[in-house]
Amino acid sequence: MRLSQLGEFGFIERIRQAVSPAEGIVLGIGDDCAATTLASGELQLTTTDLLIEDIHFRRPWSDMKLLGRKSVAVNVSDIAAMGGAPRHLYLALGIPEEMTVEELDNFMAGFLEAAGEYGAALAGGDTCRSPGPLIISVTAEGAVPERELVRRAGAREGDVIYVSGTLGDSALALHLLSAGETPDSFLCRRHHDPAARTQLGRALASSGIPSSMIDLSDGLVADLGHILSASEAGARVEEEALPLSDSFRRALEKDSELITLALSGGEDYELLFTVPSGRETALASLGQSLSLPLTRVGTVTAAAEGLLVMDRRGRPYRPGKTGFNHFSPGV
Ligand code: ADP
Ligand code: MG
């Protein structure tokens, strides 16, 4: 079915009917604004992300349902990075004329499925025709107890740097797709259907263990760089210590240069955080209770040292490529 047969309001009504009522939403889809409540002693976290066709995704490589899931994950990942729990989502769509209602239904099915998994409800949005690419803008609101907020600022010299999960899988999948190859199903999932670490983010924040935290959207080097500038600190990272999946290791055996994807590749949506060395034992027991590896990848140093990476032979170097930057020269 063409979207013109349904119209903007028919489409919005279709979304409204697919959304169930949720706690904290006094008014959801259907009025000029959503009205939501916030418990006392909690801070509201708000974040927005844009996903634009041919910049963030390619429609021919994307399954619409997975694209819906990913639109949610990349957004709630930011809430996780500050220790919050996602609550409300707002979805603004710029829709190219040739997209069918079936494609949009698949997108919405994925979006609402993922929202449910993260405990977030769709509370509103906007719908518009796009003369060109598909444009997806998602805003998420989350909540965090005031004293549990974890920021990028807070890393101190001597803290230990940890990362969850494995690094570089999403970037490796993209690298293979761009070369016309087919990534294995694990790598495909890491790229097209990433999981935001919302449970880990909440568990870390309520434990009070991390001194700083960020989610890995632009790559370890770039995102650690954000922690270091906010914290006025330097860091030393060990290539040898980077957590790599079996699929990544197999590719690395054939091409050792691919290690740059684990260091600088984006879209892992893992959490990167720093921990005072006296809290590492507490972190280890927290890690055991979650079925997600937490790996020590380096240490925080003085600001003057900047960011140094030790290669696999123990030789230090300064990483050049600092992840994806939309406005960097040559992009
Ligand atoms: P207005 O013109 O006052 O901005 P709209 O017609 O854009 O109102 O939206 C009507 C209602 O539908 C609002 O509650 C809005 O949040 C919701 N809405 C519109 N588009 C979407 C969407 N893509 N997803 C979820 N809710 C939407
Ligand atoms: Mg509107």
Image (cartoon, rainbow, N blue to C red):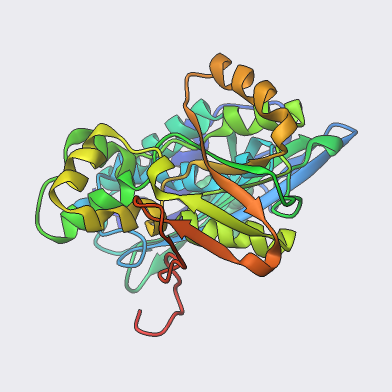
Q: Nearer the viewer, residue 285 or 69?
A: 285
Say left or right for 260 vs 176.
right
The residue sitting at the bottom extreme is 329
Residue 157 placement (x, y as % from top left) = 72, 52
**Residue 56 in the image: above or below residue 30:** below
Residue 242 visible here: no
Determine if residue 40 is in view.
yes
Task: State the count of labels.
Answer: 0
State the residue in front, 149 or 105.
149
Kindly give the residue lying farthest to the right in the view shown: 40
326 or 318: nearer the viewer: 318
Q: In this view, does 210 lie to the left or right of 235?
A: right
Residue at left offset 69%, top offset 37%:
84
Please determine whether, in this image, residue 135 is positioned above or below residue 1: below
Q: Position of residue 256 (x, y in %)?
A: 22, 53
- Which image quadrant: the C terminus? bottom left
- In front here: 227 or 281? 281
> Which of the 4 quarters of the picture holds residue 315?
bottom left
Residue at 70% x, 46% y: name it: 158
From the viewer's perspective, is 169 left or right of 288?
left
Q: Residue at x 60, y 56 (%)?
A: 235
Q: Position of residue 123 (x, y in %)?
A: 62, 41
Going by the image, does 306 lie left or right of 2?
A: right
